[in-house]
Image: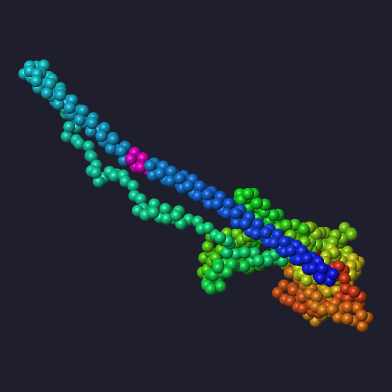
Amino acid sequence: MLIMEQKIQYAIETIDSAREHKCELEGRRKQLSSAISQVTSTANITRHEVEHYFELMKENMSCAIGSRLKALLKEIDHIELEALDPLKDCQLLIEEGIEEAASVVTSGESILNEDIETDEGFCHVSKFISMTDSLALDSLPEVPSATEVPSISAVFSSDFVETISKAVKNEGVISRRSPVQITDLSPIPGGVIATWACTEEEDDYLTNAKVKYLFRLQSFRGKIISNKGKPTKERNIFKEIYCGPEMSCTVKNLAANSIYTFRVSRCQYTESGSISRQWSPWSVYQEKVTVMPGFTWMPPKDEESYILSEKNQVALKKSGLVRVLYSDASSFVVGYPISFKIDLEGKARNKCDCIGLCMKRDPDATGMHTKEGTICMMADGHIWFNGVRSHTKFPKLSRGLVVSFCLQKSEEKQSDSKHKITTFRAALTIGEYQAVFDWIPVKSGTFNPQNLAFCMLFQSSGWKVSIV
C-alpha cells in the first residue's frame, strides 16, 4: 500500500513537472514565433524599401539624364543659331554679288556681239558702261576663317559613367540589426526613464576615444501593428523626444495606463565636430505600458485662491487669500523625485510662503513650516523639518528656479510603544545645490504613505508653480 501511494505521488509530481515544462515550452514557442515574425516582417519591409529606393533612383536618374540631355542639345542649338545668322547673311550677300556679276557678264557679252559701230550700238555700250560704274565690282565681303567660327563639340568626364556605376554598385548596406538598442524602460510617475546601449560588435567608441555619438530617441502613443510586412508611415507617427550624447532620457507627461512605443538611433561625430548625416537604422521597437499616473495638483474647493492649468500640473496664485494647495493622492511620493519650477514670482515674499511635503492636509493652515510631519522649502531659502528651522539655507525662490524633493525609505525602528518608526532619507535639490536630511514624518502611530502629499502655500498673488 505504501509503495502504491509513493508511485501515485511520483506520478502526480511527474504530471506537475510535465505541465510546468509544457508551459515553459509554450512560452518559448511564443517567444520564438515573435523572433521569426520579426525576421520575416523586417525582411519584407526592408525588401520593399530597397525596391522602392532603387525604383526612385532609376526614376530620378532617368529624369536627370533626360533633363541634362535636353539642356545640352538646347545649348548646341543656341550656339549653332547664333553662329549661323551672320554667316547666312554673308552667304546671301555673296550669292547676290555672284548673280549681279553674272548678269553684268551676260549683258556685256551680248552688247559686244552686236554691231557697235552704229549709233545704236554705241548707245548700248555707253549705257552698259554707265550701269557698271554704279556697281561695286571690286568690293568683296569679308569671309571668316575656320578658326574664327564655332566648331561645336561636347566634352564629358572620362570616368563619370564609371564613377556613377561604381557609386550605384556600392549604394546601400543591409544591416542585420541596429548598432544601438533600448535596454531598459523604467517606470516613473507620469513617464518612463529610457536607457539604451551600443551593441558590442558596434561599440567602437570604447576603443576609439575620438569617435563620439549623438543619439535620437522617438516615441508614439500606441502599438506598432504589423501589416503583413508592409511599411507604415512611421515618420508621421513617431515624435522626437531627445537628441544628444546621453544614453538615457527621462520621458515625462505620458498618459497613465497607455502603451507607448520607443525606438532609438545614432550617428557618429569626431572631436573636430564633424557630424555624419547618416543615422543608423532604428532599434527594435520597445513597448511600455505606463501604470503610474503623473503628479498633479488637487483642484481647490474655492475659486479664489489658485487657478490650475496644463492638466492640473500648473498652479497660479490668484488672490491674497491664504490657502494651501495640495497634490492629488498618489502612491508614488516615496522613491521618485518630485520637481517644481517657479514660472513666475509673486508680488511679494511672505514669511509663510513655501513648497513642501506633508503628512496631513489642512487647506486652511497658515504656517505649514511650523507643523509636525512637514518638509518645507521657504521662499526666503530656509529649510524647515517638522516645525524646526534647519541651518541649511538655499537661494531664494525666484523665476526659473527648480526645486526637487526625493524621499527614500531609510529604516524602520521599533519604538517603546512597540510601533515602528519609519525614517526617510530626504534629498532636496534647489538649482545647483543639494542637501540630504534624515526625516521622521510620524513619531508615533503607523506611517501611511497614502497620507503623504506635496503642497504649496503663497500669500501674495502672482506666484506660478509647475510640476516638471
Asked whether residue 233 appears in the rendered view, the answer is no
Taking the image as shown, residue 53 lies to the left or right of residue 159, namely right
Q: Magenta part mainly helix, strand or loop?
A: helix
From the image, which quarter does the N terminus lie in?
bottom right
Image coordinates for residue 71, horizontal then vertical, percent: 41, 44
Tag count in the figure?
A: 0
Bounds of the magenta span? 75-81
341 falls in the magenta region: no
Taking the image as shown, residue 122 lies to the left or right of residue 418, namely left
Instruction: Specify the farthest residue to the bottom.
Output: 416
Q: Could you say which quadrant of the image residue 343 lies in? A: bottom right
Taking the image as shown, residue 265 lies to the left or right of residue 422, namely left
Image coordinates for residue 305, horizontal then vertical, percent: 86, 61
At horizontal 85% and vertical 74% (from top left) the residue drawn is 374
Image coordinates for residue 158, horizontal then vertical, percent: 35, 53
Q: Nearer the viewer, residue 245 or 192?
A: 192
Q: Could you say which quadrant of the image residue 315 lies in? A: bottom right
Q: Nearer the viewer, residue 154 or 92?
A: 154
Q: Nearer the viewer, residue 232 or 455?
A: 232
Instruction: Specify the farthest residue to the left.
Output: 117
At horizontal 88% and vertical 78% (from top left) the residue drawn is 420
At horizontal 7% and vertical 18% (from top left) the residue drawn is 115
Relative height, residue 330 to residue 63 (above, below): below
Tell me, what colour scheme is on the image? rainbow
Q: Nearer the viewer, residue 404 or 100?
A: 404
Image coordinates for residue 269, horizontal then vertical, percent: 54, 66
77 falls in the magenta region: yes
Relative height, residue 252 to residue 77 (above, below): below
